[in-house]
Image: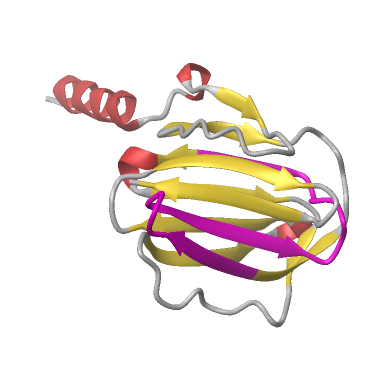
Amino acid sequence: MKLVFLMSLFFCVTVTAQDLFKQRIRKLSTRKKAIFLTNGIFHNGSIKRVASLKKIRHSYSKKNKVERIVFDFNINKIPKVYGQIEGDKNRIRVALFDTELGKSVQSLGDSHLVKNIDFFPLTNGILSTEITFKTAISADIFYLESYGRLVIDIKN
């Protein structure tokens, strides 16, 4: 009986565990590529910058059916970013290193695709963000160096 329990426990863990080695890893670009991914890992390299997230804003293009989410920082270059697109699970997770949550950051308000954005300030200056969507999504993510902005274009 114990063996059956252990085997079923092992099977459940292996079925639900993520295999990050099978995920596509993409280094972010400073320009829009119009390549929308449903799953994968993204980063901007190992550049270390201390920053504060000033605000998050969004807009929706009816013509292209794309919602744009913009993270604005207090510096001209974005901090170190590491994240994961989980379009089939309706979410994107973003870790912002050496970044604090600014006091003026507010809720997005009404959005076509975004259900919720949660912030989790962690130790060592890591600001973890989880964006939950109303439906399955695909994302094109890039950044603007001269303005200190991380841009996430979403479509379903």
Q: Is residue 63 magenta?
A: yes
In percent of width and height, residue 90 lies at 34, 48
Decide if residue 38 is on the left or right side of residue 134.
right
What is the quadrant of residue 113 in the picture? bottom left
In percent of width and height, residue 78 lies at 79, 51
What is the quadrant of residue 83 in the picture? top right
Choose between 117 and 73: the one closer to the eye.
Answer: 73
Name the residue rendered at 37%, 52% in the picture: 65
Q: Residue furthest left?
A: 1
Decide if residue 81 is on the left or right side of residue 112.
right
Q: Quick check: 141 above or below 7?
A: below
- What residue span does the magenta drawing correspond to? 56-84
Q: Quick check: 79 above or below 116?
A: above
Image colouring: secondary structure
Choose between 2 and 124: the one closer to the eye.
Answer: 124
Decide if residue 142 is on the left or right side of residue 34.
right
Name the residue rendered at 78%, 33% in the picture: 45
Choose between 148 and 132: the one closer to the eye.
Answer: 148
Choose between 1 and 38: the one closer to the eye.
Answer: 38
Image quadrant where one finds the N terminus: top left
Q: Main secondary structure of the magenta part?
A: strand
Name the residue rendered at 55%, 32% in the picture: 41
Name the residue rendered at 82%, 34% in the picture: 46
In percent of width and height, residue 133 lies at 36, 56
Q: Is residue 66 magenta?
A: yes
Q: How many marks?
A: 0
